[in-house]
Image (cartoon, coloured by chain):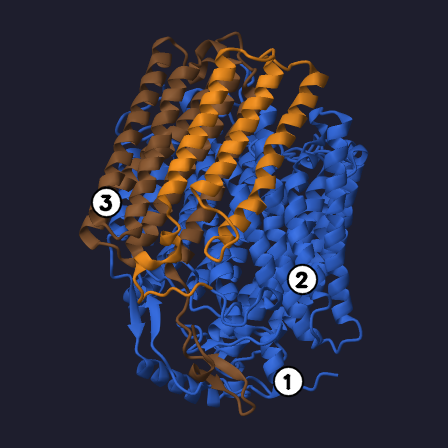
Amino acid sequence: MSDSHDHENPVQHPEVQLASRAGYVAGFILTLGLMFTSLELVTHHVWAPFKLMVATSAAALVAVILQSYLLFRLDLSKAQRWNTFALIIMIPLFVLIIALTWWMFQSLGARTMIHGMGM
Amino acid sequence: MLVHLQGPWSPLWGRLSLSEVPYHNMIVVGAFAFAIVLGAAIVGAVTYAGKWGYLWREWLTTVDHKKIGVMYILLGLVMLFRGFVDALMMRTQQMMAAGPHAAGFLGALHGYLPPSHFDQIYSAHGTIMIILAVTPILVGLMNIVVPLQVGARDMAYPYLNAVGLWLTAMAAALVMLSLFLGDFSHAGWVGLAPLTELPYSPNVGVDYWMWAIQISSVGTTLGSINLIATIVKMRAPGMTWGRLPIFTWTSLSTNIIALSSFPVLAVALFLLSFDRYLGTHFFTPGLGGDLMLYTNLFWIWGHPEVYFVVLPAFGIISEIVPTFSEKPLFGYITMVIASMAIAGVSWSVWLHHFFTMGEGPAVSLYFSVATMLVGIPTGVKVFNWAFTMYRARIRYDVPMLWAIGALALLLTGGLTGMMLAIPAINYTVHNSVFVVAHFHNMFLLIAFAAMGGINYWWPKVFGYKLDEKTGRLVFWYWVAGTIVVFVPMYTLGFMGMTRRLDYVAHPSWLPLLQLEEAGIALYCLALYYQLKQIYVSIRDRAANRVGADAWGTSRSLEWMTLSPVPFYNFAVTPVVHARDEWAWRREHGYTNLRPSRYVDIHMPRNTAVPLVIGALSFALGFGLIWRIWWLTALSLVGIVVAMIIRAGDTDTGYVIAAADVERMEKQADLRAQTVPGGRTGQPIRAVP
Amino acid sequence: MSTQNTRTQSSAGVALWDEGHHGHDVISTRTFGFWLYMLSDAMIFATLFAAYAVLASHTAGGPAAQDIVHPWYAFGETVLVFSSVLAFGFSVTALKAASRGGVIGWMAVALLLGAGFLGMEIHEFAGLAMQGIVPARSAFLSSYWVLVLTHGLHMAFGLIWMLVMMYQVARYGFSTDVVARLLSLKYFWFFQAVMWVCVFTVIYLHGAI
């Protein structure tokens, strides 16, 4: 448990002290840059659709990781470790429900030939 | 944007009209009369005893986790009764409506329930039993026990805890209201798409079902946040992860499941409500809607939900078995890993609820194998309990009977589950009553464990034990009823009987259906003895008072404080030294519960805001169901305003002075001295 | 924290009760709970993305994603979301310096930028509705509207919350409750930027490919 208590000044709380102007600015510039790069790639149709899809997804993933680190300041420090741990437990679930749903409906569509026809 | 409705609608009353009251249905009128008489009796009794103020101060506005837990369990038991009556009606209908020559009564062609009524009953039965009976009972037990087991004063967010309770209660109230105003869903508790869509279910039934589940699941999600935070952040000094009692571990894993799965249900139902209210096409048969998407989303929640209810049951068994075996639990670490593994695997098995959808073999294989994997951690648990009991001096007290009964049910339910995990078998028995028997088998295991838990922790909450003799009768009649109902049901499933039949075409199935009805009669006896047990126990409470350690061989932290537990739980926070702290203290002779001095205690203040938010949620649900838009908007704004007002309340806690704590503890001490075992628990029996 | 001499000890010197135990850290308990809520909120988005993945191609003869998304316009929204989050970050650094004026001022900037985002989004969807591109047209449009507007609804809720917090900071200063709420709001607001990265990429960029 953390060492902070009611009777201490709340502003001194470790989670308040995590705030970092430089981190926020860096997060802003880097993520906006990534999104802009993705946008340029897509609007100029630089690559084939599949390759573009992968590249922009990768850019989004990097942006989210940067945000977790620079905005949320997730790490293994005493103040943040439970937040980090809870997120790590949840990430596989996000992936599972999207990926397994997509997979089973691809397979369903291929077998029932309704995919893309909008019935 | 709003869809065009069939039938009348007015800005003031929405879809409400007097013709929505089903006064022509004798069964509903009977139920209404019963509800009125019972309600009047309760109101009259409270008024006669002059207890309204007490009820308001001590219960309706409380933020005490034990009282909230008790109210959760009471709600669950009331809904369990309602769900049981539904079951009784369905069993009776199927017995009366077998074969073309079966007579018809009360407007039904065969039996006494017309199809539309029968369909509402099975939909209500499932919804009530899973969401409003089993879930509240287990949430109630977790509410009472977890803060005590981790050595905390209360939950992490006592106010939020009360909000969760009242949301759940209001959801139950909406379901009950559907009996007397409008109708309930006829599309099964799972909401079979596209039957739930507006063109096929134009009445308010599906809306009742949808919004009741929606409101109660908000309550469950808030509860899960609360319990996880309590376990992570509120543990007493020395309560390391390796010392956490197994019930707390299973509560943690179960609430991780709830936290992650209930949002999926919320989305599934919201998308359905957009279809019904705004005319979108998520699950419609036309314009690109995909009805299997609903089924998929529902079971993404639905299967984890199964483990959400089964894991606390495993936790309860893990507490009861060591206490009455007078031995530590065998394989603590494997038990923890198994609990977490079950929670993890629960996220990759949902397709086995609709193997016949038409997906490819690779997909089926993945979900089939994942489903079978669940058998491994579950098997580990069964063996751990068996090894705990192996060569132990077992005492067959009532909680232990329920735990052993639950074990037997877990074996049959688990093995039939393994059969259903095999796609080839699943294709054969899909939608048959074999499946129904299987999941009832599993839910009865949970109910058995919950009954064991109630018997086990009752003395901790109320200070006296439940009556043994009637308790045994409840157990044995319940066991007999379970066997007599569900063995024939498994058999009928193999004979090809499908679920949800309001008319049974094969008269040759009649004898087995009659046997099931006999089983229901046994359940009725169990119910009678259950009511008698509670009555006798309250009447004879003076003779059944217990000390801190009600069973004499309990092991975890909750048995280190007085029975009944004072509202501040522990006068002074305990220091934890061992995995089974109370057993450790007993072995080392540290059974004196008195600290050297008392200190001030910070406590949360009671508040009526949760009750107000609950009432506004009821109004919100009512407005949405009947499409009374002014009421919907008003109650939504009301909820937000109530939250903001609460956020501005700076006086949410108070301090009990050390001297007052000391005085209350001394009084409790005097009371405890009149009880055998008294202040330090019952005499300790030697551990072999 | 508590030391041995504030604890009740047995005759053998084993500490049994901790009289010096102050209870839990209120602020981090509150923010942890809010963090858990946000993870469940993230699950709501994950489910909506799963539904979108299934339904994106179900256009039922109506407009497809390529026909209705405008990546450059959406990038304008991206700039607004990100800069609103940046302004809120400065509000939190002002909290670190215990400056009431800084907290309220930067939060007002974040509020305006967030309102600008909402304005752009409302303009976009009003335009779609005018052209008859409504959710009732097809399953694709249903999931498109619901996914994007769920994010918008979160933004709107965040704006109301900011108004409440600006009032609370002015009225109560930096009490434990207020600081815990500010930290929770910080998580909530930053989280909208994370979700917007996903919405922007999957809906607006993949839609335009």
Which amino acid, by three-letter code, is at mark 3?
Answer: Gly
Cα separation, mark 3 vs mark 1, equals: 59 Å
Q: Which residue is mark 1?
A: B587
Cα separation, mark 3 vs mark 2, equals: 69 Å
Quarter of the image containing the N terminus of chain B?
top left
At 68% across and 32% down in the image, what residue appears?
A: B354
**What hue does chain C carry in this figure?**
brown
Q: Is residue B602 visible?
A: yes
Q: Which residue is mark 2?
A: B477
Q: Nearer the viewer, mark 1 or mark 2?
A: 1
Q: Nearer the viewer, mark 3 or mark 1?
A: 3
Q: Position of residue C91 (x, y in %)?
A: 29, 43
Q: Residue furthest bottom?
A: C11
Give the left or right position of residue B432, taking residue B21 as reference: right
Q: Position of residue B121 (x, y in %)?
A: 55, 39
The relative height of residue B496 versus residue B378 in the rendered view (above or below) is above
- Which of the chains is orange? A
| Chain label for disc 2 | B
Q: Position of residue B458 (x, y in %)?
A: 53, 70
Q: Nearer the viewer, mark 3 or mark 2?
A: 3
